Image: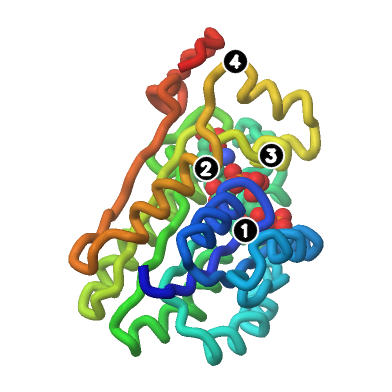
Amino acid sequence: MPNKTALITGATSGIGRAIARLFAQNGMDLLICGRREERLQALQQELGARVKQYLVFDVRQRQAVEAALQPVVDRYQIDILVNNAGNAHGLAPIHQGDPDDWDAMIDGNVKGLLYVSRMVIPQMVERQSGHIINIGSIAGKEVYPNGNVYCASKHAVDAINSGMRLDLNPYGIKVSQISPGLVETEFSKVRFKGDEARAASVYADLDALQAEDIAELALFMATRPPHVNISDVIILPTAQASSTVVDRSGKKY
Ligand code: NDP
Ligand code: 8X3
């Protein structure tokens, strides 16, 4: 593959970090983003010169996003934007949900994705090329009990993914979404505010997806020929049939 440059948000953990590793192994240059600087430094050390720069910012802070990304879009041609940063916060019925959690999910998963995209897409439009890979979720396709606002945020990503593809169609820009089911990352630890035992129980009795499974799909999408755009893929563990139907017998596949 010619030397492409990918900007990946949420590269400090889970899916984003796995994508960064696999893209680097496959010859891509990287701009990696997150809030935890020490993890970005560690990843840069691990991946060496493939990491052109790491960027520390909170996607919820519009001015911080703009300040971090303006010099980067001025300096680098970004061929691939992976909009991955995001999390669930809490799992509660709608009448008991914490509005701070709602803010975190709407501001991070939706507005943050938009802020980053708004900075990167104009250079793609100017160049008439580029590829945006949005990390959605099965929660963007279905709603499950107590998932209310997280599901809403991922339904928004699903709509934004479609909207991007429509608006960017005249410019030859690919827009893809990956919509995973249960992936064993730090996701549940964040959702349950550091409760490790509760987080572990989400994946304990099923053969969950691993972050590397999602990275392989992202790499496949990113390496299709110019005329092929994989628009949207739902990827589930074999044990998962839907958001609410999961074989939790502990079977290993
Ligand atoms: P992790 O918690 O392991 O990783 C989340 C990443 O997002 C971290 O790198 C984190 O970096 C970053 N992030 C979160 N909030 C912000 C913020 N406000 N500003 C900047 N960066 C942020 O979870 P996953 O890898 O599982 O999640 C990645 C994406 O995949 C999310 O969008 C999630 O919704 C989606 N997803 C996850 C599934 C799962 O089952 N795990 C299934 C379907 C979709 P840092 O904390 O350093 O800022
Ligand atoms: C993460 C998958 O089912 O926990 O988006 O919401 S789920």
Residue 198 at x, y percent in the picture: 73, 25
Helix, strand or loop at mark 2: helix
Relative to 24, residue 115 above or below: below
Quarter of image, res 179: top left
Mark 3 vs mark 2, CA separation in Å: 21 Å
Do callouts 1 and 2 mark residues in contact (Cβ within 8 Å)?
no
Kind of residue at badge 4: Asp
What mark, if any, has residue 10 been given in the picture? 1
- Residue located 48% across and 68% down the image: 28
Mark 1 vs mark 2, CA separation in Å: 15 Å
The answer as to whether callout 2 falls within 8 Å of ligand 1 is no
Helix, strand or loop at mark 1: loop
- Using a 10 Å C-alpha cutoff, classify the residue at mark 4 as few (fewer than 14 neighbours), some (14 to 19) or many (20 or more): some
| Dot 3 or dot 4, earlier in sequence | 3
104 horizontally vs 183: left or right: right
Relative to 61, residue 159 above or below: above
What mark, if any, has residue 191 been given in the picture? 3
Kind of residue at badge 1: Gly
The answer to whether residue 109 is seen in the rendering is: no
Quarter of image, res 171: bottom left
| Dot 4 or dot 2, earlier in sequence | 4
Residue that mark 4 sits on: 205
Residue that mark 2 sits on: 212
Kind of residue at badge 2: Glu
Helix, strand or loop at mark 4: loop
| Dot 3 or dot 1, earlier in sequence | 1
What mark, if any, has residue 78 been given in the picture? none
